[in-house]
Amino acid sequence: MKTEKKFYRFICVIAVFLFCCLLNGCQKQADYLKIVGNGQTEYVIIRSQNAKRWEIEAALRFRDALKAVTGAEIQIKDDFEREGTAYVRTDKEIIIGSTNRENEFETDYDSFKNGFSIFSSDSRLVILAGSAAGMDAALEQFFSDFFGIAPGSEAASADKLTELTVSSDYKASLKYDSSELPFLGIPLKDYTIVKDSGDYMTKRCCMLLKKLAAEISGAEPDVAEEKRSGGNLMIKIDGTVGDGNFCISISGTDITISFADYYGFGAALEWLRSEYESRGYFDFKDSSTVNGNYMLYLDKTTASDEYAFKRAGAVRVMFNNILWGDSSGMAGRLNRDIPSAERHRLTAEMAAIYRPDVLGLQEVIKHERTGMNGIVTLLSDAGYTEVKNTDILEMASSCTPIFYREDAVSLKASGFKIFDNQPDEPDSSKSMTWGVFESKADGEKFMVVSTHMCTEDDEIGALQATELIEIVNEVTAEYGCPVIVGGDFNAVYDEKTYKTLTETAGYLNARELAAVSTKVRSYQTYPIYDQKLGIMQPVGDITIDNRGSVDHIILDNTDKLSVGVFGVVVDECSRSASDHLPIFMDFDFITE
């Protein structure tokens, strides 16, 4: 009897043991994850409530791609939790990116760095990545492995596959050493910016590229004159690229940015910036190239820049006040001085691109006119001749010189006058310079006046306008030609100085007459000296308010002119050169 009881006791122990083993086996991870069955799913996508932008976008891409392939609607939730509510974690989750679920499984980010790792943990599918590039690669890998397509491809919605089963031992991973340049393998901060010459514009381009690289990577790359081991970002001015164009080419780990002018370089920077903002990395591979043009990045404020390399008329006239006297932006410069050398170089670069036939400047300082960085010297190098007047050369303060291209026009007569009416201030020398020109294309004559009028007192400005009108009348009595008066009037539309010229004398505003025009205001916030970069930089936004402009082009004898375009140059260089933006007009003569 005792033996029988022992036997039964033994059988019970064995039964309990087998039951426990069976129960424990049921609790083990299944051999697979049934994510979608018959076009339905019990899974949810989990992302962090503090997810990075590319993690948020990845969750959306996964959801949309899964629906396109299987028809299954899957919900996206963040990882917020609260006991006793619907905000609790479940077993059936697809983890995308770093979340608070990482206490449920082992993570080793060092093993894939900026790449990715995909694996299952119990009933969860986990997709981790160290960068936007890594996450993109992870999604491509997963959908390729299970559906043979890329997420978002047209093939995804062609034939519905209503099942998605993932093996519990499925794993995929890829290691990237660079988040910005995953396919080149060198972090952007470790690149060297290489300039091919020591001229000013090359240096400026290097500094602007350095600024952008620092914004992206958080660290400033070195700048050198020769290539170094590792990655090199090379700046190359190349006229064969074409006006306003850029070419970014990859050779090994070296990246070369080629361009012919600052518009092309600016467009390259815009492409780099927009590419990184949209993608989170650069899809550069050995032997790949990217080509573009600045026209792709114009908007309503920069619309006039469309005419940088083309014209809307046979003749182009331009005006620009190139001095600004506020030293508030000069912190970091010796004696808080205004950098005339840089200002002049930027102005000359702009003129070399727009190539006006006649260029009128305002506030050109006597001691800044000549020398290596003098505006007269730099414009001469760009093919311009100054309308020479003895009075300009002898004056003590600023002047309003006119420059012209001898290949386009010839000078017939000229003059200069410091207005008799001046504010009671030392060195006040508001003035006008005029020239009568003959177009070499068709022999037609026209008069150009470059002027700068009183800043402090609108009544005095009106008297100066009257003086200008008298001189113009004397000249046109002899030549009977159209008149183009431009410059810094220091007066908006409703001030007396402007009205004296328009309402009293009957001059018409080219901005209003042009077939194509802009409402961009002609002046802006003072540029500022960027001490870290060592160059001038624009500040603030451009204003759309033509009636608030103080720089104007006004016309007399307009029946002899057809104005094709009135423009305001708005670009990084011009905005860095002055608080006044260049204004221009293109026109044709009406000869019938």
Image: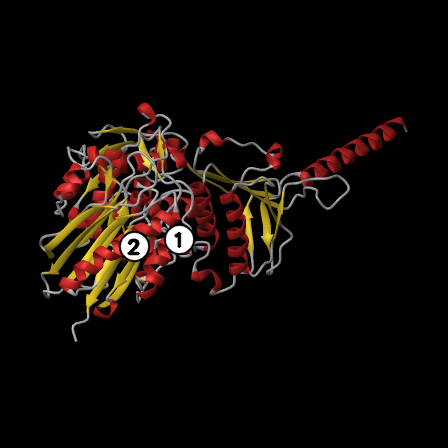
Give the crowd class for mark 1: few <14, some 14-19, many >=20 residues within 10 Å.
Answer: some
Residue type of the residue flagged with mark 2: Thr
Position of residue 430 measured from the top left corner of the image (x, y, whole percent): 28, 43
User: Label 1, on which residue?
Assistant: 492
Residue 497 seen anywhere in this rendered image of the structure: yes
Say if residue 176 shows up in the picture.
Answer: no
Q: Quadrant of the C terminus?
A: bottom left
Q: Which amino acid, by three-letter code, is at mark 1? A: Val
Color style of the picture: secondary structure
Q: How many marks?
A: 2
Q: Quadrant of residue 233?
A: top left
Left or right of residue 105, residue 250 in this image? left
Dividing the image into 4 quarters, which one contains the N terminus? top right
Q: Residue furthest right?
A: 1
From mark 2 to mark 1, how far is it between C-alphas?
A: 17 Å
Q: Which residue does the numbered mark 2 point to in the structure image?
A: 466
